[in-house]
Image (spheres, rainbow, N blue to C red):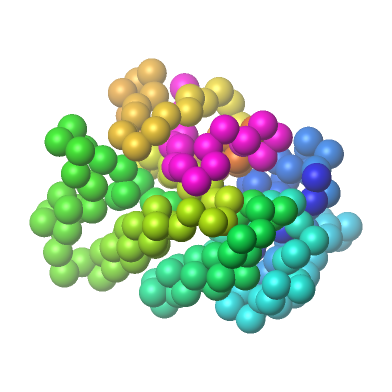
Amino acid sequence: MKIGIIGATGHVGQAVYKEAVANNIDATAIVRDAKKAQSLLGADAQIVEKDALALTYDDLKGFDYVIDAFASLKTYQHIDMAANLITMFRENTATKLVFIIGASTLLDDDGKPMIDTVLKKYAGQPWIDAPVQQSHEFEYLKWVDNVDWIAVTPQDELSDGPKTEFKIGGDHPMVNKEGKPTTSTGNIAAAIVQEMKEPKHIKQRFSVVDA
C-alpha cells in the first residue's frame, strides 16, 4: 500500500506518517518544508516538497490513499484543498481520500451539528472560523458520490499523545472511560491506518475516542 500525507509535519500528519511506517506501509510526506519534515520524521523519510494547493493529479495518482491533514491560517483553504482533491479523483476510485474533520461537525442529542451550539456560545471569537469552515467542508463531502472519500473526526479534546486503546463511533460525540471527550494523535492515526487496511467507512465519517 502506498499513501501520501498532505501536511505530514502537523500534529495529526506526523502521527499518521509514523504509524503507517510502523505498519510497513509505504508512506510519503507531502510538505512545504522538506528540512522540517526530515527533522520531525527522520532523515530517511520519503518526502515530496510542494505547496498543498499546487498539487496535481500527476503528483498524487500513484497513491492508494491520500490523507488530507492540511492546515492553514487561511481557514477557507480547507474547503479549497478538499475541492481540489475531489476534482482530481472524480470517477476514479483507485485512490481513496481521507479527510480529518473537526469535532464541531458531530451531532448533538437532537441530531443538529454541534457547530450551531459552538457559534451561539463563542460568536466573535478569532478561532471560530476554523470549525465553521470544516463544517462547510464536511457538508460538501456528503454531496460527493463518485469519489471514494472517508472523513475521520476526533473528539473535542484532541491532543498529542501515544497510541493506546481507542473506540470507533459515528456521528455523535463520545467520551473515554473517565467521561472526557479526548482523542490522542496516536489513536486517531492508528484508527486511520486500521481503516486503510480494512476499509469500512467509504463515503462516510467515523469518529475516534480514547478508550
| Pick the front one: 199 or 49 | 199
Task: Identify the residue at horizontal 58%, vertical 78% (top origin).
Answer: 53
The span shown in magenta is 195-211
Specify whether residue 201 is painted magenta. yes
Task: Identify the residue at horizontal 67%, vertical 40% (top origin).
Answer: 196
- Residue 204 horizontal/vertical position (percent): 46, 42
Task: Identify the residue at horizontal 11%, vertical 56% (top origin).
Answer: 120
Residue furthest top as drawn: 177
Q: Quadrant of residue 153?
A: top left
- Residue 35 horizontal/vertical position (percent): 77, 71
Specify whether residue 199 is painted magenta. yes
Q: Is residue 210 above or below residue 156?
A: above
Residue 60 visible here: yes
Q: Quadrant of residue 50?
A: bottom right
Q: Quadrant of residue 108?
A: top left
Q: The N terminus appears in which quarter of the rendering?
A: top right
Residue furthest left as drawn: 120
In this picture, residue 85 sits left or right of residue 56: left
Q: Is residue 145 above or below residue 109?
A: below
In this picture, residue 46 sits left or right of residue 73: right
In this picture, residue 112 sits left or right of residue 64: left
- Residue 150 horizontal/vertical position (percent): 53, 47
- Residue 194 horizontal/vertical position (percent): 65, 33
